[in-house]
Amino acid sequence: MRHKNGQISSQIFTYILAAIIAAVTLLVGYMAIGNMMEQQKIKGLEMFFSDLDAAAKRTATSSFGTQNSQTLSIPKDYDTICFSSSKTPQGKFDASVLSAVDQDKYPVIYSNLEADTDKNVWLINDKVVLDSSYIPEMDVEGGFLCLENKGRVKVWFRSTGTRSVLYI
C-alpha cells in the first residue's frame, strides 16, 4: 500500500487512540475507587460518633444505676481513642478531668480541655489528634480514659439519672 508523505497510517492512529482511551478509563476508575474509599472512611467515622452518642443518651435517660454496653467499631486510621468527662453545668471541664490527663503525652487534648472547647472524644494517630467530637451526656469514670484501637471496643455506660458514665 502506498502512502503519501505526511500521512499517518490509520492503524497507528487507531492504536494511539485506543491507548489514550484506556489510560483515561483507568484514571477515572482509579479516582472513583479512591473516592469510594474516602466516603467509606467518613461513614465509618460518622457511625462511630453516632453510636457513641446514642448509647450515652440512651443510658443517661434511663433510671439511676441502669447499665448498658455498646460495642463500637473504630476506623482503622486511628491507633488511640481518648474520652473525657463532659463539661459541668457551668460550661467548664472539672479540674479533676484536667488533672487526669497526661499533659506531656496528650498536649492537644489537655489544651482543648483547658480552653473548655466542645470536645471530649478524640481519635489519635501517631500522637496527632485527627478527629474529635463532643458527647454532652457522657462522663468518664476517673475523668479521662485512652484506649488502644483494636478495631472494636466494648464500653459500658452506667446511668446517674441525668448523665451516663463510661467505663471499661
Image: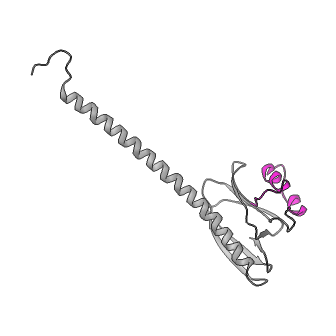
Q: Is residue 85 left or right of residue 8?
A: right
Q: Position of residue 14 (x, y in %)?
A: 23, 32
Q: Nearer the viewer, residue 73 or 117?
A: 117
| Residue 102 forms part of the magenta stretch | yes
Image quarter of the N terminus:
top left
Image quarter of the C terminus:
bottom right
The magenta segment: 92-120
Q: Say if 65 sits above or below 134 in the image.
A: below
Label tally: 0
Where is residue 138, by image quadrant?
bottom right
Residue 105 appearing in the image: no
Where is residue 15, by image quadrant?
top left
Q: Is residue 154 left or right of residue 1?
A: right
Q: Position of residue 88 (x, y in %)?
A: 85, 67
Q: Is residue 61 left or right of residue 3?
A: right
Residue 118 appearing in the image: yes
Which residue extends farthest bottom?
63
Residue at 73% across, 75% down: 157
Colour style of the rendered protein structure? one colour
